[in-house]
Image (cartoon, rainbow, N blue to C red):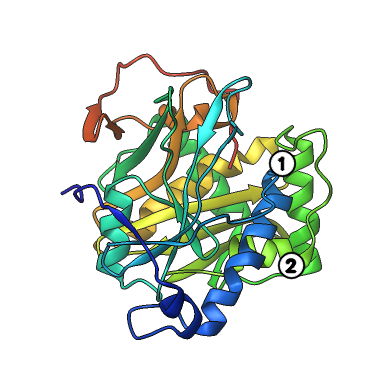
Amino acid sequence: MLASPSRPTRVSHEARVHGSRRHPTRGRRARIGSALRARVRHDGRSVNRLESLPLLVELDPPELLVYDAPEPCPYLEGRVARMPLRLPVRELEPRELDARLARGDRRHGALFYRPSCPSCRACEAIRLSASYTPTRTQARVLRRGRRELRVEIGPPTVSEERLRLYDAHRFGRGLAKEVSTPIDAESYQRFLVDRACDSFELRYYLGERLVGVAVTDRGASSLSAVYCYYDPSLARLSLGTYSILEQLELCRREGLEHLYLGLYISGCDAMAYKARFLPHERLVGGRWTAFERGTTSPSDENDAG
């Protein structure tokens, strides 16, 4: 099920300049720099140059390795991370997205990445079966949400309303770094609207007010929860948990097998809520490993998106 390791090869100057059917169009290549700049602004990275990159990664379809350098870990203080960024040469088909999710890839705008840290294996991809049965507490969250909220599905988009809600979530839940500034429309576009696969957003409304957004990717047999943000003042609705339960219901309605929740990171409070969904599978040492109910899991205090 897991894809075999792929070997990057250097892209020739001619291919980078002129392109071909196997390489990105000029417009797609031109977006590499802006996508990286958006990630720099969003994550606080200090990326100033691509040096000898890009390299060609021989996947299906091929991808360009556009950034690969050690950096301070965005999840665990004091650790060094390495998260190479890859740009597919074209938009992925659903089955191709499934293959990347199964090997632990995550998406950031038009880019994919997978932690490849030199001395740490704390990041583990996590997924739920579409047949997941909610706990009694989760079932109450679902019932309450369905009584009070309205759900709409549409293409990801950027708006002033979304920018305000995104920042309210980020700053209100302590997810922003000290140096963080409010997100702007370009950064939001590059992070959550630009895409490399079929993507949509779930919109949660309380009355006429947008109170949550969950950007979601669709594969042939799975959904992937890319990012969820919501009004932090509505803790009583447990919107992070509610969103996962709605995504699971969508998996069941569409006959899909899995919902990917991104990364579970032991020791990172912002990611702890994912481990409360038991049973689940985590990608440990290259193998999907089952964790059943009764497994020790973090407290229910953090319900981040």
Q: What residue do we see at 33% from left, 52% from top? A: 101
The answer to whether one can see residue 252 in this image is no
The answer to whether mark 2 and mark 1 are in CB contact below 8 A is no
In what element is the residue under mark 1? loop
**Location of residue 203 in the rendering, given as x and y in whole percent from the top left corner:** 60, 63
Count neighbours of disc 2 (C-alpha within 10 A) and say few if under 14, some if 14 to 19, many if 20 or more.
some
Q: What residue do we see at 43% from left, 39% from top? A: 115
Question: 136 or 271, which lies in front?
Answer: 271
**Location of residue 223 in the rendering, given as x and y in whole percent from the top left corner:** 36, 57
- Name the residue type under label 2: Glu
Residue 109 vertical placement versus 114 (above, below): below
Q: How many marks?
A: 2
Residue for badge 1: 234
Residue 29 vertical placement versus 231 (above, below): below
Question: 305 or 301, which lies in front?
Answer: 305
Q: What residue do we see at 50% from left, 47% from top? A: 68
**Location of residue 214 in the rendering, given as x and y in whole percent from the top left corner:** 56, 56
Question: 291 or 43, which lies in front?
Answer: 43
Asked if residue 283 lies left or right of residue 41, the reply is: left
Task: Examine the image and state in which quarter residue 80 appears.
Answer: top right
**Location of residue 103 in the rendering, given as x and y in whole percent from the top left corner:** 28, 47
Count neighbours of disc 1 (C-alpha within 10 A) and say few if under 14, some if 14 to 19, many if 20 or more.
few
Asked if residue 78 lies left or right of residue 126, the reply is: right
- Name the residue type under label 1: Leu
Q: Which of marks 2 and 1 is nearer the N terminus?
A: 2
Residue for badge 2: 186
Question: 200 or 41, which lies in front?
Answer: 41
